[in-house]
Every structure is written in structure tokens, then in C-alpha cells.
Image: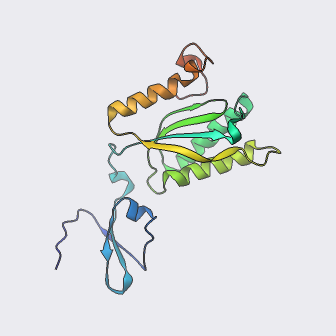
Amino acid sequence: MVSLNINGPLILVSGAVPRSSRLYRDERVLGQGPSGVTIAHAIPPEAVPESWSPSFITFSCFHRLPLLEAPATKEPFEFVLEQTRSRHRARVYAYVLMPEHIHLLINEPPLILVAQFLKALKQITSRKLRGDRRQFWQDRYFDANMHGETARSEVIRYIHRNPVKRGLVASPEQYRWSSFNH
């Protein structure tokens, strides 16, 4: 007999849980019970510690074309980013909209994966911005977890200084399309 010390409720999921699911990824699956029932530890979203590592995300326009150069494309993207962030209760620590790519520093939303968050964000913005193009975004994206306050601060600084480095503005506060002034 195995003794488990578990803080919080258990959830029982009928049938097998795929290894790609959030339950397995977050190491909440405790095992298979009788009749193939999966036993998992339920962690409510409000109990997720603030210290969990945010994800640094970069994704690009199709073929790295400057499809986000005009304010008419950046404004709808910011609107959809806020809608998607709010709907999925994600926290956006920093972002910048460059002419051909985007940088985001976000936490893992409580109920979906970062990949699902990005899929929703990219699908909605693509429909709004694509026009007669076949594709607006590159399919893939870069993703790295930032561990610790120092790494988080460095990435935020990198994100906000990106337009300066590219010569678009002289200082981060001059660039309208980032979280620097929010």
C-alpha cells in the first residue's frame, strides 16, 4: 500500500489521460486507479505560485515580411492580444510589436497551454490582418522559460530595447508598440 500526502482535492478522470495533456505535463497525474481511472491532484489556478517561470515567446510574420509595419496592423493585434489575455487569464509581463516579428513574455495561462494561447492569438489576428495573403504568420515560434528574477528582468529589458537596437527609435519610451509605457 502506498501512502500519499496530498494537499488539496483529487480528481478522477474516466479513462486514460494522454501524456501530452496538461495533467501529465504539470506532473499532477498520480497514477491509474481501478478500471483505468486516472487519479490526479487538482491544483486550482489561484494556487499556482507566482514564481513559476514565464515564457519568452518570439514569432514572426510569414517569410519575415514586415507585415506589422503600419499602425493599421499593430492596433488590431494589440486589441486581440488583450482580448486573448483576458479570456485565458494570462499575465503579459512585456511585449513588443516589431515590423516583422513579436516578442512576448507571458505566464502559462491557468487552463490552457502556452501553445494553445498562441494558436488562438495567431488565428484571430491572422483572420483580421491577412487580407488576400495565404498566410500571415510563420507556423513555428521560439519559446524559452525564464527562471528567476534576473532572467525575467533581462528579457524585459531586451524586449523593450529591441526597437532601439533596430534604430526605430532613440529610447524605449518613444516606441508606441510595446508594453514599456503601460
* Identity of the residue furthest to the top in this view: 170
Color encoding of the figure:
rainbow
Residue at 37% x, 43% y is: 53
Does residue 137 sit above or below 116 in this rendering? above
* Identity of the residue furthest to the right in this view: 132
Q: Position of residue 133 (x, y in %)?
A: 80, 45
Does residue 178 sit above or below 82 in this rendering? above
Q: Is residue 65 left or right of residue 20?
A: right
Q: Is residue 116 left or right of residue 25?
A: right
Residue at 60% x, 16% y is: 169
Residue at 43% x, 53% y is: 110
* Total numbered circles: 0
Q: Quadrant of residue 99?
A: top right
Does residue 138 sit above or below 41 in this rendering? above
Q: Quadrant of residue 4?
A: bottom left
Q: Position of residue 49 (x, y in %)?
A: 32, 47
Res. 71 in view: yes
Res. 181 in view: no
Q: Which of the two residues, 37 or 98, is positioned nearer the viewer here?
A: 98
Q: Is residue 113 left or right of residue 125?
A: left
Does residue 38 sit above or below 54 in this rendering? below
Q: Position of residue 86 (x, y in %)?
A: 53, 46
Q: Indicate the quadrant containing the N terminus: top left, top right, bottom left or bottom right.
A: bottom left
